Image (spheres, helix red, strand yellow):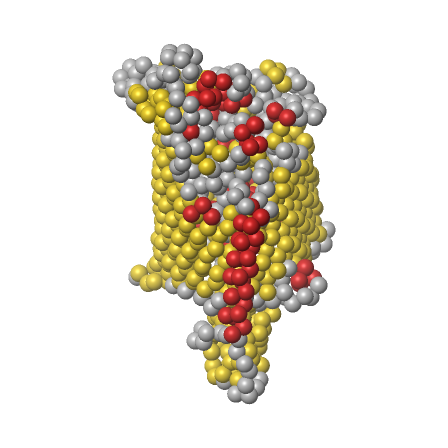
């Protein structure tokens, strides 16, 4: 393939689309006459009085409008004399209308103050049901936090969560298949394996299939249908257990709109990528004394994949995501506010993905190749979720939120597991095979398509698992003020008490099919009996509660908190000889009670500059079997932040002192997939997080918005004791060995130009080199993943008041890079891909 020509052709298409939009826009530009007037004004964010750029301000009855500039100002020219309703609209904010009279030859002034809306409940309740409270709240937290709102999500139109999270300091991610279907996410050195060491939520509800019994998250909500994403680290995130060492990630689903509205997005791109995303909703419909709101949403996406399977075949995925909400709330002006929101989510996915990677030699020659032995590998999943959330505010100082939820998740990842070169001979795991292709040359030849002499050459495992979870949680909030010492200052008090009962389970019911290889094609020779490979049930019954108190006296805020976890873990193993489960299983149990304290302090030196510090206990539950203990640490952070019009800066240093780090035997990490846990003992993680955001257009008065965002994370994570571990990624550990799959340096840079109807943005992501095995000193080639930099570019042009077109190039320079050497062999990152699409809203 001529990559230079292909790259040039794609850039030409990208530029042509934007040029065509410019011509359409200029052709539609109005000409001012003496019989016409002008509407101008400014848009600010309600409550903080900061300018809002990019707000769509339009006249409701005319096909004309303008976007607000970096300083929030806007101007609509060529308006015939008369009275009009002017609308200010921006995704994530409540739409606002004002009536304006326009006189010929004169200018009418109008001002808007838009309120950010994450949910249609009182502001204090929003703060309790989210991690940050949105754009305003993120600056009031006595600890490290990040909020990515709808404007930032739309800017790059990400469906891959890893590309987004690489811009958040302190978050560590490891890619696997290039699309972010099953992201590996960690925070502050916790380990990334299947996101099993962070608290993962959607709308404040645990969303990993079985976060206590089997925390490896093989399901993660679809980022492309989210309104916002937020990350919280440090002492105040103990509210969001059970994992309190690194932090919590909460995805905020689309809210029910404040009025009747709808939107749709159509996307097409490289490798036959197709996406349809649409939603519609309304609020305020009367039902007796209640007001009813509804939202329906769907996202359908498919791609054939960028890897090239020997002999041909699909290496991509198909996903169908459905989301619906129904809300009943008290009418405006009611003496007692109440709201009941019902939510349902259904996600189906078929992904032609494999654990089989490449040898280093093959990756150097053909990095996007897939061996013939993986041609039958496919994962089928189905996720269902239902929840009901009731909010009542019996008094202005008291609120109660009650949430009931249930999830079901079924998955069967049918994939190559082991290979044998002789009839009845020893079977070699694919991870061992690709690490030693010369030693197992006969097995490697079969995997790459050579005809096998035996009918039992390839073992394909049905990694069949069913998950179930349900829970009930309740939060009470109480706010009151008292006089300060001597009556000089008012002291604000905010007390929050919460509890949650949660049950989850995983049912592993697996079996193995046998295949032979015939000149590059797999032929099944024996169908296995379900339940004969892995046959066990693992469950967790938990009760958690917490109390958190925030005291604010002038410029000082102190936030102590205490969390309690009671966990009963159990595993019943029926074994491969009892697929009917008629016998008595072996049973393992483990019970623990844990208290998790924390405290954070924030002091505002000035209105723009503050400093904060915190200390808290880190915790992660153990498995139900073996000698593994719970993961424990003491975590410290010290930071400072500065925020004012157009600028936000933050610097945080952290130190996590583990008394016991825990690792798990996951197939996704190159292990055997038993889920057994291993004690790692003392570990120290030292790090630095830097983040800066600025609108250069506003600061330099350029007349256009020029958003700039920089982030950097330094992490130094080392074992403080020596031991020999059965956990493959650790192996034989010496004091001072660095943790694997944790780059020392990572960062990002984003820069854009957003001028009214047009926007172009670029994003560079940097990931430093990392080791695949615990060790120290220079990294041997066989254990090294080289660092890489990728660049994404997006552009969007609004062609009408209701429609815009967009285009993007991911991995602009077509960088070829390795993202991991697990589960088995080297795996490539996403190559250069091109997408173009259309957005409409009504």
**Residue 450 image offset from top left, x and y in percent:** 42, 23
Q: Quadrant of residue 829?
A: top right
Vertical relation: 366 (above or below) 327: above
**Residue 611 image offset from top left, x and y in percent:** 70, 46
State the residue at coordinates (58%, 39%): 816
Disc tally is 0
In-front residue for pair 62/791: 791
> Which image quarter holds the C terminus?
bottom left
**Residue 512 image offset from top left, x and y in percent:** 35, 21
In-front residue for pair 628/450: 450
State the residue at coordinates (39%, 27%): 520
Vertical relation: 827 (above or below) 528: below
Q: Is residue 581 left or right of residue 721?
A: left
Vertical relation: 161 (above or below) 119: above
Q: Is residue 782 visible?
A: yes
Q: Is residue 342 left or right of residue 808?
A: left
Q: Quadrant of residue 209?
A: top left
Vertical relation: 397 (above or below) 637: below
Q: Is residue 637 visible?
A: no
In-front residue for pair 257/120: 257
State the residue at coordinates (42%, 47%): 272
């Amino acid at each position: 393939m001529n990559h230079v020509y292909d790259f040039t052709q794609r850039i030409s298409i990208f530029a042509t689309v934007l040029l065509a939009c410019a011509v359409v826009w200029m052709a539609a530009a109005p000409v001012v006459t003496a019989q016409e007037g002008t509407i101008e004004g400014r848009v600010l964010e309600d409550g903080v009085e900061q300018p809002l750029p990019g707000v769509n301000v339009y006249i409701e009855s005319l096909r004309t409008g303008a976007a607000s500039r970096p300083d929030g100002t806007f101007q609509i020219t060529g308006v015939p004399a008369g009275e009009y309703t002017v609308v200010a609209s921006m995704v994530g904010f409540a739409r606002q209308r004002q009536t304006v009279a326009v006189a010929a030859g004169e200018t009418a002034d109008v001002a808007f103050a838009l309120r950010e809306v994450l949910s249609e409940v009182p502001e204090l309740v929003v703060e309790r049901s989210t991690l940050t409270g949105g754009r305003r709240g993120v600056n009031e937290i006595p600890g490290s936090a990040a909020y990515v709102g709808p404007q930032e999500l739309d800017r790059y139109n990400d469906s891959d969560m890893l590309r987004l999270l690489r811009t958040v300091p302190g978050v560590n991610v490891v890619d696997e298949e290039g699309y972010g279907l099953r992201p590996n996410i960690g925070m502050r050195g916790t380990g990334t394996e299947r996101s099993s060491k962070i608290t993962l939520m959607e709308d404040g509800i645990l969303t990993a299939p079985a976060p206590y019994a089997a925390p490896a998250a093989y399901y993660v909500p679809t980022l492309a249908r989210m309104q916002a994403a937020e990350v919280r680290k440090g002492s105040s995130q103990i509210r969001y257990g059970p994992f309190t060492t690194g932090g919590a990630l909460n995805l905020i689903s689309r809210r029910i709109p404040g009025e009747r509205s709808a939107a749709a997005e159509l996307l097409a791109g490289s490798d036959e990528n197709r996406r349809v995303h649409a939603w519609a909703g309304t609020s305020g419909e009367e039902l007796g004394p209640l007001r009813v709101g509804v939202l329906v949403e769907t996202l359908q996406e498919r791609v054939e994949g960028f890897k090239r399977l020997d002999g041909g075949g699909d290496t991509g995925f198909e996903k169908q995501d459905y989301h619906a909400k129904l809300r009943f709330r008290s009418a405006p002006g009611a003496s007692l506010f109440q709201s009941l929101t019902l939510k349902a989510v259904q996600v189906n996915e078929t992904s032609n993905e494999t654990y089989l990677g490449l040898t280093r030699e093959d990756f150097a020659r053909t990095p996007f190749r897939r061996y013939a032995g993986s041609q039958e590998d496919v994962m089928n999943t189905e996720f269902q979720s239902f929840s009901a959330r009731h909010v009542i505010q019996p008094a202005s100082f008291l609120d109660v939120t009650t949430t009931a939820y249930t999830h079901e998740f079924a998955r069967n990842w049918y994939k190559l597991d082991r290979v044998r070169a002789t009839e009845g001979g020893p079977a070699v795991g694919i991870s061992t095979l690709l690490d030693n292709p010369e030693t197992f040359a006969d097995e490697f030849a079969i995997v790459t398509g050579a005809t096998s002499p035996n009918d039992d050459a390839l073992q394909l495992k049905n990694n069949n698992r069913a998950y179930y979870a349900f829970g009930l949680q309740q939060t009470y909030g109480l706010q009151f003020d008292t006089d300060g010492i001597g009556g000089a200052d008012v002291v604000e008090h905010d007390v929050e008490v919460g509890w949650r009962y949660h049950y989850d389970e995983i049912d592993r019911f697996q079996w193995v099919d046998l295949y032979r290889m015939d000149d590059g094609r797999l032929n099944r020779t024996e169908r296995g009996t379900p339940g004969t490979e892995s046959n066990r049930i693992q469950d967790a019954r938990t009760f958690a509660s917490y109390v958190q108190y925030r005291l604010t006296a002038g410029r000082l805020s102190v936030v102590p908190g205490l969390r309690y976890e009671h966990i009963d873990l159990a595993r019943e193993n029926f074994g491969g000889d009892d697929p009917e489960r008629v016998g008595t299983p072996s049973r393992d149990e483990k019970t623990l009670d844990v208290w998790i304290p924390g405290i954070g302090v924030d002091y505002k030196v000035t209105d723009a500059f503050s400093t904060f510090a915190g200390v808290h206990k880190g915790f992660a539950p153990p498995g139900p079997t073996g000698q593994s203990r719970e993961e424990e640490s003491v975590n410290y952070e010290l930071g400072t932040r500065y925020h004012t019009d157009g600028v936000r800066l933050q610097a945080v240093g952290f130190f996590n002192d583990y008394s016991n780090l825990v690792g798990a035997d996951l197939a996704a990490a190159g292990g055997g997939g038993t889920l057994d846990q291993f004690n790692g003992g003392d570990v120290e993680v030292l790090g630095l997080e830097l983040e800066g955001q600025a609108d250069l257009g506003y600061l330099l008065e350029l007349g256009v918005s020029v958003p700039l965002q920089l982030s950097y994370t330094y992490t130094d994570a080392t074992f403080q004791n020596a031991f020999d571990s059965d956990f493959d990624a650790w192996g034989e550990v010496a004091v001072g060995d660095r943790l694997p799959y944790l780059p020392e340096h990572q960062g990002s840079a984003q820069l854009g130009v957003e001028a009214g109807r047009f926007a172009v943005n670029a994003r560079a992501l940097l990931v430093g080199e990392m080791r695949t095995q615990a060790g120290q000193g220079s990294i041997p080639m066989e254990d090294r993943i080289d660092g890489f930099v990728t660049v994404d570019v997006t552009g969007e042009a609004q062609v009408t008041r209701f429609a815009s077109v967009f285009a993007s190039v991911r991995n602009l320079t077509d960088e070829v890079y390795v993202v991991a050497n697990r589960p088995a062999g080297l795996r490539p990152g996403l190559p250069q891909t091109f997408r173009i699409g259309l957005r409409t809203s009504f």
